[in-house]
Amino acid sequence: MNHALGEVLGYPDLILHGGRIVTADAAFTIAEAVAIRDGRFLAVGRSDEIRRLAGPDTETVDLAGKTVLPGLIDTHAHVERAGLLSCTVGFEGVSSIDEALARVRAGADRTASGEWIRGRVWHPFAQLREKRFITRWELDTAAPDHPVFLPVSHFSLVNSRALALAGITRDTPDPDGGKIHRNADGEPTGILEEAAEELVERLLPPWTFGEQVAQMRDAMAYFNGFGLTSAISAAVSPGDLRVHQALRDAGQATLRISAMFAPTGGLNPTLSLQELELFFSRMGVASDFGDEWLSLSGVKLQVDGGMTLRTAAMRSGYPEDPDYRGTVVIPQERLNGFVSIANRYGWRVGIHAVGDAAVDAVLDAYEAADRERSIRDRRFVVIHGSLMQPDQMLRARELGVRVDAQSAFLWDKAAAIARHMGKETADRAIPMRSLIDSMGLDLLGQGTDYPINPLSPFWNIYVMTTRCDATGTLYGPAEAITREEAIRLYTSAAARYSFSERRTGSIEPGKLADLVVISADILSVPDDALKDIHALRTIVGGRTVFEAA
């Protein structure tokens, strides 16, 4: 390469040199420098070669030995929730019910009487020393003059005022696919499970469109701050899809979004199968439609709950209750029907399935759909697959079905999993070594399920490669994977979720110029230092969208 070649190819807009460029290409090449032009990688190689391409207006940056990764891709996150950080009550660092109630009380003090207090997703069972949910009566003491709605992933906690506004009394029946929890006297406790959450959630006043656009910009910036340049947004409502499109059309998007579409806003639409068929027949588009900034990766469904909430659907009973096997929120017949309809109209499907019985249900539905119209090579998804068994991995591989997992659940919730399901089950949770050995990297990806878990890719990579939680406690060391594999799960393998492997996921000439400069050499630092790595600069399409102060 030389200056004359730069004249032929066009001079780079930006050159990063003098670093350790982890390309994540097929050979996992480590380079020293990269040149970017018109939002794409122009050349990758040695520093002396790449610097000779510079033109009179080329910006050059000396990395001073720092490590660069391809732009990181979270394959399962609720991106939109990050936009609510400034307008909701957070429970980060809370470790007792009294502390949680103090946060609600502070929210009430700054909110006009009668207006809603909304919380951010948190995890009482993992966080609180009491290891239980907060009741309506406790919330009443903190916010007697406000309706309160606190989401807890598959559950929501509400106070008496919120129940009254929703018309929920001791005589209100449980909705299909949900449960209104009650005390021994039959009174609702303020704990709403699955579909019952919607009885209150639908009363929340909507944000204006302008507010939603501003929140989405904030959400993207938050993701960029962790080195993330793309994400599969896990359950995008029609309204959120309009907001994403507005940002894309205005050229203001800084995070590439591929959406798992939630057609009626919830994970399991309440429409009849006949109504769902009519809906899909009139859509006019199918999944894997879109461009480099915004696309549809499929439609999202849910079968069971989760490990940390003791609601994962299991083949065998729970340790202290052999007759209890978790929660199933959609019957097999309806699941089969939904998948069949979506498949018929060209829609890929991704289904939340945590427990092994839930994974059985998903694979049964996928196999039935495959008999009607092949799903092979269309990358249908088992979302989570946290307790998959070896026989299920082989079934998934045979169908070409992806598994997109989140080892981040072990970061601060492994002890809760062990408490609910036993240490042996916690040790085999999120079995990445087994998944890679059975299915290969191309059918796998990693994410966080943010905001249920922290967003940091480096905390997640620490868990994947060490199988240690935030306290250093070891869970199932046989399921640990290598650092190269963990990086690929966030880059080259992750790009395959949205059929984007030819344009993102690695640093190679012609691909979109997405990368992150990080604070330490991820391939050589001690294990404990992995979790301390952070993003210094994030570039999306050749444009810096985050730079550490």
Image (spheres, helix red, strand yellow):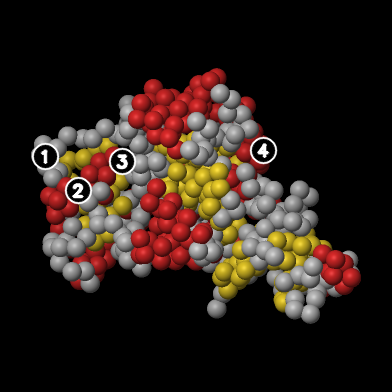
Vertical arrangement, residue 63 with respect to residue 351, above or below = below
Q: Residue at x 26, y 32 (%)?
A: 176
Of the two numbered discs 3 and 1 on the same chain, state the one appearing first in sequence. 1
Between 437 and 424, the residue placed more toward the observer is 437
Locate residue 213 relative to residue 149 in the image: left or right: right
Between 93 and 129, the residue placed more toward the observer is 93
Vertical arrangement, residue 5 with respect to residue 23, above or below = below
Residue named by callout 4: 440
Locate residue 515 relative to residue 111 in the image: left or right: right
In whole angstroms, how far apart are the C-alphas of marks 3 and 4? 34 Å
Would you say the residues marked 2 and 1 are in contact, meaning their CB atoms lie under 8 Å apart? no
Would you say the residues marked 3 and 2 are in contact, meaning their CB atoms lie under 8 Å apart? no
Vertical arrangement, residue 546 with respect to residue 301, above or below = below
Of the two numbered discs 4 and 2 on the same chain, state the one appearing first in sequence. 2
Between 220 and 120, the residue placed more toward the observer is 220
Would residue 226 be visible to someone looking at this image? no
Vertical arrangement, residue 204 with respect to residue 535, above or below = above
In whole angstroms, how far apart are the C-alphas of marks 4 and 2? 44 Å
Residue named by callout 3: 194
Q: Which mark is residue 170?
A: 1
In whole angstroms, how far apart are the C-alphas of marks 3 and 2? 13 Å
Q: Residue at x 53, y 20 (%)?
A: 372
| Residue kind at label 1, given as amino acid type | Arg
